[in-house]
Image (cartoon, helix red, strand yellow):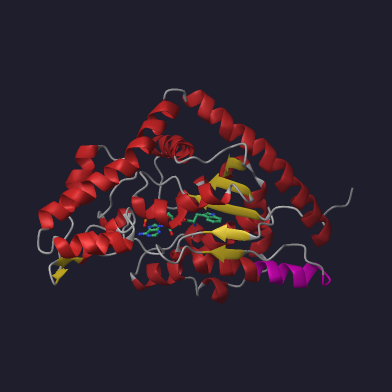
Amino acid sequence: MSKKVFLSGVQPSGKPHIGNYFGAMKQFVELQNEHDGYVFIADYHALHSLRNPKEMNENIKNVLLDYLAIGLDPKKVIFFKQSDISEHTELTWIFDTITTMPFLMRAHAFKDAEAKNKEIDVGTFNYPVLMAADILLYGPDVVPVGADQKQHVEIARDIAEKFNRTYGKGNQIFKLPESMILEDTAIVPGTDGRKMSKSYGNTIPLFAEHDEIKKCVMSIVTDSSGGIPQNVFAIHKLFRAEAELKKIYEEKAGKYKELKELLVEDIEKFIAPLREKRKEFAKDIPKALAILKFGGEKAKKVAGKKMTEVREKIGVNVY
Ligand code: ADP
Ligand code: TRP
């Protein structure tokens, strides 16, 4: 039996934090052992918020190093860059013609921007359609994402169904993908207790040096109940078994500084090897880039074949 296929995209939007790691990145490394996989850098998605070319260029290289460092294996996963495969934007246009405005107006990202009275560019509005194209070109069974991206995967399913109904004559041109959410760590809390997010400035960076880890941990807001600092505990349980941790926190109830010091040690133990691996990859950037380019060549073959089928189905293929 052939292996199941997973696919996911990551925006090159700066330094990853442990919320990104436990909510999304880690799953790729686990999945690659039992699945065939596609992981890509969603640089075109990032354009709606990142308009500095130098920063874009650096972020792409950084995210490449990040993923190699956490153990993404290019022998097991096709690792590529979205903008290398023009089929993503081509298919987006075709999907645009079968997707209605009211349907996209239900997307959370659009509704949030509208509620904040933000000026919304067409790219932001259309973001879920590009994401649908990203996914459907490769026919994955599962799409591992954080909880906040679940709706986008549902939109991709709806678009696939609409296309299949419109052009498929009952055949499944596009496979319907399932999202895959790690429930335990679906929302990793930040140092202030809210969801860990770059936009809240409450993160612990994934490749932080020891001093930075210490600074972040010491800044965790200690809202305690019965001497157990809940925010510290919630982050700590990512790094140590909960039962063992409960005992320690009960024994050291009220001793916030000691508990935080223990958390610093546990995070350092976890991060140090990743940090070192990343430094190794960073010594040879051209080699890392060659991995990405080669992945693009492989992805292009799959996407190109699907687009040939799509062009036939919609009737533009006359030669
Ligand atoms: P941020 O909120 O820091 O900007 P992104 O939106 O770039 O993070 O998210 C990248 C990936 O990491 C997504 O799949 C997202 O769902 C996941 N993710 C981000 N923050 C968290 C968190 N606090 N807990 C779990 N997953 C997260
Ligand atoms: N929108 C996703 C995010 O912000 C990134 C992404 C783009 C993606 N295309 C995708 C994720 C396709 C999964 C599948 O995290």
Task: Look at the picture and state if 215 lies above or below 185.
Answer: above
Q: Nearer the viewer, residue 61 or 1?
A: 1
Q: Nearer the viewer, residue 280 or 107?
A: 280
Task: Look at the picture and state if 277 lies above or below 22.
Answer: above
| Residue 138 horizontal side relative to residue 167, left or right | left
Task: Look at the picture and state if 15 lies above or below 116.
Answer: above
In the rendered image, residue 28, in percent from the top left (x then y), is placed at 52, 50
Task: Look at the picture and state if 286 lies above or below 86.
Answer: above
Q: Nearer the viewer, residue 58 or 31?
A: 31
In the rendered image, residue 318, in percent from the top left (x then y), is placed at 88, 52
The question of residue 169 being in magenta is answered with: yes
Residue at point 41% right, 64% down?
Answer: 186
Residue at point 57% right, 59% down?
Answer: 143
Q: Which residues are magenta?
A: 159-170
- Residue 44 visible somewhere in the drawing: no
In the rendered image, residue 81, in percent from the top left (x then y), is placed at 56, 41
- Residue 199 visible somewhere in the drawing: yes
Most prominent secondary structure in the magenta stretch?
helix
| Residue 184 horizontal side relative to residue 298, left or right | left
**Residue extending furthest toward the right:** 319
Q: Nearer the viewer, residue 318 or 10?
A: 10
Q: Quadrant of residue 115?
A: bottom left
